[in-house]
Structures are given as structure tokens and as C-alpha cells.
Image (cartoon, rainbow, N blue to C red):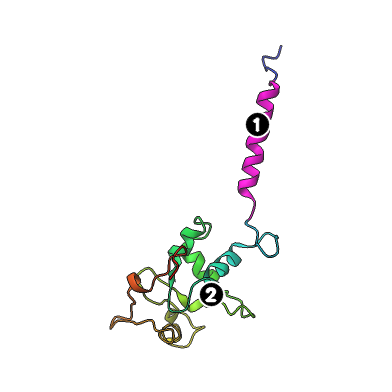
Amino acid sequence: MSLKRKKTTSETSANLTIREENKKSQKPQKSQKSQKPISVFEQVYELVLAIPSGKVMTYRQISLLLDERLSAAGVGWAMRATPNDERKIPWHRIINSRGGISTNKTLNFAPNLQQRLLEAENVVFNEQGLIDLNIYQWKKDNTN
């Protein structure tokens, strides 16, 4: 003899609603232009494209804006894989949380290239090779 009780219609509807909400929350973000799901790397690039000249964001800051779907290191990997296309993604505007550049540790970049590109946008580095994040860090909701 089975002791399993039959679910009521309201319980079944509630379970379906919960499952539908869970599915909705797990869907990948869609680009406003194409309405196709976009990769998390593409979401990083969209954020980077929004950074104005003369401003920077940190790897960690982007990670937090993406609800940590990528770690700060993962954002670094995304930046390292930046496509060289017509969008001209300003990869040089992403720096570490100390206000320094991290690209001097890679072989893919000319020495001090990132610093030179930022200085060309009037970003000032101190003697230790750091910038003042209080001045140059861009917050996505800022209007400056």
C-alpha cells in the first residue's frame, strides 16, 4: 500500500511557477541589438566599451557588475582574449585594484604600452606606477 499522496492542483501550479522562474533566472543575458544570448566575455566587452576616455575600471569591479559570473582573474582572461575588430575595445582601461597595470607581466604587450595608452588619455601615474582610483575610476552609473 502506497502512502504517497497526490498533489493538489494549486501545489502543482506553484511548483511549475517556481521552475519557470528558475529557468528564467538562468537564461543567458541577451544583447539589446541582436536579442541572441551573448557570452560572458561579450558582456565584459560591452562594459569596457562604455568606459569613457580618461577613466578606468578594475578587473574586480567588472566581476561584481557581472554578478561574479567571472572572477577578477576571469575578467583578465576575457581582456587577454579581446577581439581585434571594428569595435576597437579599449582593453587598456582595465587595471588592477591597486590602480596599477598588469599587462607588463605578459609577453603579448610592448613594455608600458597600457600605461602609455592611458597617459595619452590624460591619466596620470605616480612614481610607483599607480593611478589615483578616486580620480580616474569610472562607475557605470556615473555621468562623468
Residue 25 shown in magenta: yes
Extreme-left residue of the structure:
127
Q: Is residue 48 left or right of residue 30?
A: left
| Chain part drawn in magenta | 7-28
The image shows residue 13 at horizontal and vertical percentages of 68, 29
Which residue is identified by label 1? Answer: 15
> Counting other residues with Cα less than 10 Å from the Cα at mark 1, is it few (<14), some (14-19), or many (20 or more)?
few
Which disc is residue 57 wearing?
none
Q: Which residue type carries mark 2? A: Arg
Extreme-front residue of the structure:
143
The one nearer the camera, 133 or 112, is 133
The one nearer the camera, 73 or 49, is 49
- Quadrant containing the C terminus is bottom left
Name the main secondary structure of what is drawn in magenta: helix
The image shows residue 56 at horizontal and vertical percentages of 43, 73
Residue 85 occupies quadrant? bottom right
User: Under tag 1, what secondary structure?
Assistant: helix
Number of the front mark, 2 or 1: 1
Q: Earlier in the sequence, mark 2 or mark 1?
A: 1
- Quadrant containing the N terminus is top right
Q: Residue at x 34, y 77 (%)?
A: 131
Q: Residue at x 62, y 48 (%)?
A: 26
User: Under tag 2, what secondary structure?
Assistant: helix
Which disc is residue 80 wearing?
2
Extreme-top residue of the structure:
1
Residue 98 shown in magenta: no
Q: Residue at x 65, y 25 (%)?
A: 11
Q: Which residue type carries mark 1? A: Asn
> Counting other residues with Cα less than 10 Å from the Cα at mark 2, is it few (<14), some (14-19), or many (20 or more)?
few
